[in-house]
């Protein structure tokens, strides 16, 4: 049964009786939908209560490929699941770039494309770029003959696959793409930050990290950890906070004091605990802002009660209960007024009101300006349940100057 959960479009499931569930040979008497044997009757159209418009005839050449009797059409139907992978980028909310558009003109005229942190991108993203450039440039060569520079390090974070296993992450990696055989590799050997700033300790620290990534640094046999002789070692999170943020009750109003302090953490739950602990030390009064959650499809409202929607929290979605204090650093998670207020802009809370938050911008072109942040409708992009949350588009800052995620 293990093979049944490891999807492989090239695997012939019909050759294995345990995996073959048959063909969709049953027809619904209400809506004419095709169904598998044993599938519950009436689930497709709620026993005729749901009426859908008739499906239009597929355009050519798709219609001939689906219904034709030629060798090409039979091969297409046999491997149709493999061809469906070409449309996998739709799950990433990608835009279609066509000839004659502004984006298409930019790609047609550019001489060099640089893709930073390419090792973190799904291989399907590179396939989409390859096919797009071939179409725009009218060439069947790899990337349409354009020069593409991919920057990254495979010792860092690989592509994120939601609910996936380590094998799924490796399978989504660029090295498992047909494009990898055409990649010419170059290595950067000089640490420019250490060279230009003359900081020898920074260079030594960077070399130590490279040795760890190459597996050349032995682990402690008793703990399984790699110990690096740098900085001070603390015994508890409270001691760490007192070392990084000493006398925070008096210093929290000094933005420069905050900007030179940060705590790295490897897990999001650790970051949240540290942020809550630090915010509690601020002397100002707490304000709680609760979101308004509703399902987008009114027909599904009964299936998802409000209490369940309130409990949903994803990386790109603010929690139902947002607790803030005056003086607390926050970060925007949506574009509001580009380029002044963009996703990732850091702010300091100046005044908390019922419907808006007055903040001071800490980063970007609007640094030092006072602006107002309203509640906005936020729809999560990576959730199977389509719902809307009306909340302030910000989080207690996790990158700066409080604890932040280390990728």
Image (cartoon, rainbow, N blue to C red):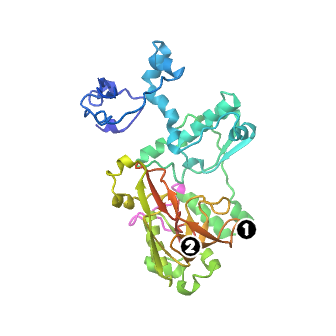
- Mark 1, residues whose alpha carbon is within 10 Å: few (<14), some, or many (≥20)? few
Query: Where is residue 186 drawn, in percent x and y?
Result: 66, 45
Left or right of 273 in this view: 308:
left
User: Which SS type dominates the magenta stretch?
Assistant: loop
- Residue range corresponding to the magenta coloring: 213-229
Quarter that holds the N terminus: top left
Query: Where is residue 256 drawn, in percent x and y?
Result: 65, 78
Q: Is residue 98 magenta?
A: no
Mark-to-mark CA distance, 2 and 1: 30 Å
User: Which one is earlier in the sequence, the residue at label 2 or at label 1?
Assistant: 1
Badge 1 marks a residue whose secondary structure is: helix
Which of the 4 image quadrants contains residue 112? top right
Question: Residue under circle 1?
Answer: 197
Query: Where is residue 232 drawn, in percent x and y?
Result: 52, 77
Question: Residue under circle 2?
Answer: 329
User: What is the residue that sits farthest to the top in this orientation?
Assistant: 70
Residue name at image x 45 percent, y 17 percent: 67
Badge 2 marks a residue whose secondary structure is: strand
Which of the 4 image quadrants contains residue 194? bottom right
Q: Is residue 220 magenta?
A: yes
Q: Is residue 74 visible?
A: no
Q: Looking at this view, is 110 or 57 the one in front?
A: 57
Q: Is residue 273 visible?
A: yes
- Mark 2, residues whose alpha carbon is within 10 Å: few (<14), some, or many (≥20)? many
Residue 126 against residue 325 in the figure, above or below: above
Residue name at image x 58 percent, y 67 percent: 373
- Say the numbered circle drawn on residue 401: none
Which mark's residue is nearer the viewer, 2 or 1? 2
Query: Where is residue 57 drawn, in percent x and y?
Result: 48, 22
Left or right of 189 in this view: 168:
left
Q: Looking at this view, is 298 or 344 the one in front?
A: 298
């Amino acid at each position: 049964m293990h093979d049944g959960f490891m999807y492989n479009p090239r695997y012939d499931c019909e050759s294995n009786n345990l995996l073959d569930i048959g063909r969709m040979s049953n027809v619904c008497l209400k809506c004419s939908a095709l169904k598998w044997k044993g599938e519950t009757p009436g689930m497709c159209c709620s026993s005729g209560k749901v009426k859908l418009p008739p499906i239009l005839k597929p355009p050519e050449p798709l219609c001939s490929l689906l219904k034709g009797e030629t060798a090409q059409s039979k091969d297409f139907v046999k491997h149709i699941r493999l061809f469906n992978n070409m449309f996998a980028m739709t799950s990433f909310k990608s835009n279609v770039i066509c000839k004659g558009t502004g984006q298409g003109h930019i790609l047609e005229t550019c001489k060099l494309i640089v893709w930073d942190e390419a090792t973190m991108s799904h291989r399907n993203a590179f396939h989409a770029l390859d096919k797009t450039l071939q179409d725009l440039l009218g060439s069947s060569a790899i990337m349409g003959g354009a020069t593409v520079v991919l920057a990254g390090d495979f010792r860092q974070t690989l592509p994120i696959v939601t609910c996936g296993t380590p094998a799924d992450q490796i399978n989504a990696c660029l090295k498992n793409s047909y494009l990898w055989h055409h990649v010419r590799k170059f290595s950067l050997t000089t640490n420019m930050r250490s060279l230009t700033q003359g900081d020898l300790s920074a260079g030594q620290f960077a070399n130590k990290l490279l040795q760890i990534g190459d597996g050349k640094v032995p682990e402690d046999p008793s703990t399984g950890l790699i110990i690096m002789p740098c900085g001070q070692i603390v015994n508890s999170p409270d001691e760490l906070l007192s070392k990084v943020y000493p006398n925070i009750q008096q210093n929290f109003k000094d933005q420069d004091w905050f900007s030179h302090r940060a705590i790295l953490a490897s897990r999001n739950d650790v970051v949240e605990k540290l942020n809550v602990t630090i915010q509690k030390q601020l002397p100002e009064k707490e304000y709680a802002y609760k979101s308004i959650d509703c399902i987008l499809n009114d027909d599904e409202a009964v299936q998802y009660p409000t209490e369940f929607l309130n409990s949903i929290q994803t990386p790109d979605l603010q929690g139902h209960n947002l607790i803030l204090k005056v003086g607390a650093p926050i970060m925007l998670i949506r574009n509001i007024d580009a380029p002044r207020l963009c996703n990732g802009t850091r702010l300091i809370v100046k005044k908390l009101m019922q419907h808006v938050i007055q903040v001071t911008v800490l980063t970007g072109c609007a640094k030092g300006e006072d602006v107002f942040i309203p509640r906005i409708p936020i729809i999560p992009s990576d959730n199977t349940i389509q719902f809307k949350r009306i909340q302030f588009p910000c989080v207690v800052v996790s990158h700066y100057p409080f604890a932040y995620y280390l990728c």
